Amino acid sequence: MFYLVLFFAARCFAAPQEIDLANGEWPPLLGANLPQYGYASQIVSRAFALENIHVKYRFYPWKRALDEARRGNVQGSLLWIDNAERRQDFLYSQPVYRSKVVLFFNRDRPIDWSQLDDLKGHRLGVTHGYYYGKALTQLIQSQQLQSDIGINDAQNFAKLLAKRIDAFPCEEAVGMHLIRHNLGSKALEQINISTQIIHEEPMYLLISRKTPNAELLLQRFNQGLAKMHASGELNAILNGCPTALRQKYASLIRKGC
């Protein structure tokens, strides 16, 4: 009887744990219709899988994704930048992805700049709810830079192609994916990309503080992520995207082909 109890206890311990995470649309990193739900989702799923945890994603608009996790209806959400307000409701993982925001502009209306102050007087498209770093935000708030707010990145690229704005700061891999897959060859001919980075910062998995054993769950994720670092698996995923996108698409965009 004792061995039977041990057998079933071992079976229960070995059974994969399942968790639900709120996700959103940010191709090629996140998306309901992308292979493995996008490269960032692939990283999160694999890190948990190494700790015998299976992830189910629920896709929502971004505000609702965060609210669902904050209320504890799901265990967490991905990907988010750090801020003090969110830390009241969430635990932050080790960095999953490092976002790089660059400047997209019209090839026949080039912008020569080396620092953000050089952009003063220009009209930039910005996407509602997105953060572009402290320095650029201050230039916009002080009206040294004109801003034209769009509801999403695609709308801002449409305004850029129509020359209603001078430039559009966008996450590099996301912008290049959008141009390549949604806007077509004409956009590749018209749009160029700066080599300078407007803003960069790490992005994280958030675990809701309302999740039972939230700290243990986060610890297991971080352990899985560390294993991916050590084995080279994390770099292999990132070398598929966005590094490959940066090398391939940026070259195509700059050449205009």
Image: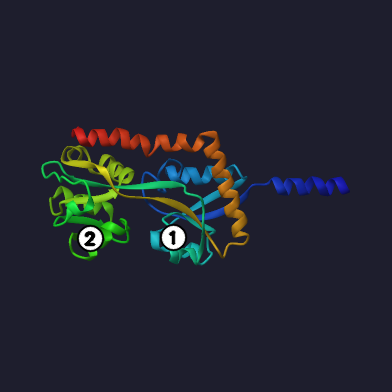
Q: Is residue 83 left or right of residue 179?
A: right
Residue 181 horizontal/vertical position (percent): 28, 41
Q: Split into 4 quadrants, where in the image is the C terminus? A: top left
Work out whether mark 1 precedes mark 2 in sequence or the reverse, and give the earlier one.
1
**Callout 1 crowding tier (Cα within 10 Å): few <14, some 14–19, many ≥20:** many
User: Which of the 4 quarters of the picture holds residue 23?
Assistant: bottom left
**Callout 2 crowding tier (Cα within 10 Å): few <14, some 14–19, many ≥20:** some
Q: Which secondary structure, mark 1?
A: helix
Q: Residue at x 49, y 43 (%)?
A: 43
In the image, 118 versus 238, the foreground residue is 118
Kindly give the residue lying farthest to the left in the view shown.
108
Q: CA distance from mark 1 to mark 2?
A: 30 Å
Residue 236 horizontal/vertical position (percent): 46, 34
Residue 89 horizontal/vertical position (percent): 50, 66
In the image, 122 versus 54, the foreground residue is 122
Q: How many marks?
A: 2
Q: Residue at x 43, y 40 (%)?
A: 35
Q: Amino acid at mark 1?
A: Ala
Q: Amino acid at mark 2?
A: Leu
What label sits on residue 139 in the rendered view? 2
Q: Is residue 190 left or right of residue 247?
A: left
| Scheme by which the image is coloured | rainbow
The mark closer to the camera, 1 or 2, is 2
Q: Classify 47 as above or below 148.
A: above
Residue at the spot of label 1: 65
